[in-house]
Amino acid sequence: MPNPIVRIHNVKTGEIVDREMNEIEFAQYEAEQAAAVLKLEQAETKATARQEVLDRLGLTTEEAALLLGGN
């Protein structure tokens, strides 16, 4: 499978160049994608844990926000 495409647009000349990512760019791209997935998974885990605590306390999200001084 080919690497993703990089678009380079020279605004001075109007020239547009499309090319495949080189190995270094592709490695960075994959690392950034993995980090984004990890961050999303962590946020989902935190939200689930927060909701479990609220459920045990019998509170809604809005009630908890009022108690904790949130908007």
Image: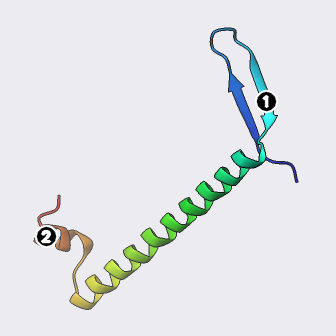
Residue under label 2: 68
Q: Residue at x 65, y 51 (%)?
A: 28
CA gap, disc 1 and disc 2: 51 Å
- Given this view, does label 1 or label 2 mark the residue nearer the observer? 1
- The answer to which quarter of the image holds residue 60 is bottom left
Task: State the quadrant of the C terminus.
Answer: bottom left
Answer with left or right where residue 53 lies relative to residue 24.
left
Q: Are marks 1 and 2 in contact (CB under 8 Å)?
A: no
What colouring style does the render use? rainbow
Q: Residue at x 21, y 88 (%)?
A: 57
Task: State the quadrant of the N terminus.
Answer: bottom right
Answer with left or right where residue 46 lies relative to residue 27.
left
Q: Residue 44: which disc?
A: none
Residue lying at the far top in this picture: please name it. 13
Residue lying at the far front in this picture: please name it. 24
Where residue 22 sits in the image (x, y, percent)? 78, 43
Q: Nearer the viewer, residue 48 or 33?
A: 33
Three-letter amino acid code at the position of disc 1: Asp
Residue under label 1: 18
Three-letter amino acid code at the position of disc 2: Leu
Neighbourhood count class around disc 1 (C-alpha, 10 Å): few under 14, some 14–19, many 20 upward: few
Q: Secondary structure at mark 1?
A: strand
Where residue 16 sits in the image (x, y, percent)? 74, 20
Query: Which mark is first along the chain, 2 or 1?
Result: 1
- The answer to which quarter of the image holds residue 33 is bottom right
Where residue 45 sits in the image (x, y, percent)? 44, 77
- As displayed, is residue 17 above or below residue 58? above
Q: Residue at x 67, y 56 (%)?
A: 30
